[in-house]
Amino acid sequence: MAPFKVAVYLYPHADILDFSGPTEIYSCRPFDGPGQFKITSFAHHERIETESGAMTYVPNATFKEIEAKIEEFDILVIPGAAFDQVSSLIKTKEGKELSALLRKFVASKPTHELGKRVLQSVCSGSILLAASGVLAGRNITTHHLGFDMLKKVADEAAGADSKVNIVKTRWVDAGSTEAGVRIINAGGVSSGIDSTLWIVEQLAGKQAADWAAKIAEFEPRSKGWSEGQ
């Protein structure tokens, strides 16, 4: 079976664990064989400085390169950042191009032989999804401090009540689009690892997911930070 192609979008001040957590899990492979996921990072910028300033990343590809062939990818990962950074990005030319890319991705039918495609957000990355309008009418989530902002942005994108249902949980399956693209929102930061393990299980099987969790020494959790509060 051909490996699943994963595109990870990077942008200035994105949270490190939001994108490195899923990337770590997708990178896990058996000791005696090739990995089942092939990862490509991409960005509008040649170099990406993280929120902390502790690291600078050089993406594999430019935004334009991935935009031209986004239909070839099976998974698209959108990380989050501080809420003010997300709000600023939404208003920029880059943010508008990202919104258009998200709409194009969820409208493209899966091309992998298993017929599966996933749009995955981590933390406040779901607010970027909301700004594109792809979350309207769905069960969704984000970092527990961003629920109000998520609703506001979703409503603004819809031009009225977006009819989203914000769920206080670790991660949520927001359902599939008409084209058959599954949308998955993770809650805050480390929740992206939990959702990624579930996605691995759905696409590559439970054995692959269990192996990735074992290698990462990560125990999946089902409850969100704000559940019961």
Image (cartoon, rainbow, N blue to C red):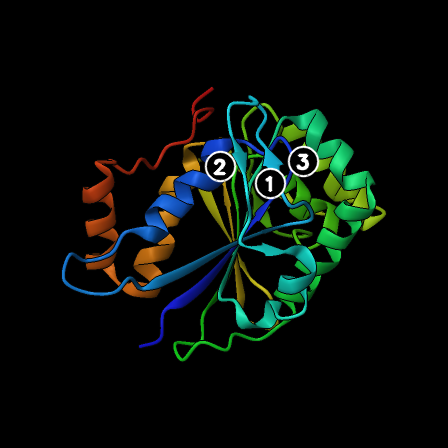
Give the structural element (helix, strand or loop) at label 3. Answer: helix
Q: Residue at x 19, y 51 (%)?
A: 211
Identify the residue under disc 1: 125
Task: Let me know if residue 170 appears in the view.
Answer: no
Identify the residue under disc 2: 18
Residue 7 in the image, given as x and y percentages of width and height: 52, 57
Give the spatial CA distance, label 3 vs label 2.
17 Å
From the viewer's perspective, is the residue at label 3 or at label 2 nearer? Answer: 2
Three-letter amino acid code at the position of disc 1: Gly
Three-letter amino acid code at the position of disc 3: Leu
Task: Let me know if residue 20 appears in the view.
Answer: yes
Horizontally, is 103 left or right of 156 in the view?
A: left
Give the structural element (helix, strand or loop) at label 1. Answer: helix
Q: Residue at x 48, y 41 (%)?
A: 19
Give the spatial CA distance, label 2 vs label 1.
9 Å
Query: Circle 2: is it few (<14), some (14-19), or many (20+) Cα within 10 Å?
Result: many
Query: Circle 1: is it few (<14), some (14-19), or many (20+) Cα within 10 Å?
Result: many
Horizontally, is 176 left or right of 220 in the view?
A: right
Q: Are marks 3 and 1 in contact (CB under 8 Å)?
A: no
Identify the residue under disc 3: 150
Q: 86 or 29: which is nearer to us?
A: 29
Q: Are marks 2 and 1 in contact (CB under 8 Å)?
A: yes
Furthest residue toward left: 32
Tag 1 or tag 2, which sits nearer the N-term? 2
Three-letter amino acid code at the position of disc 2: Asp
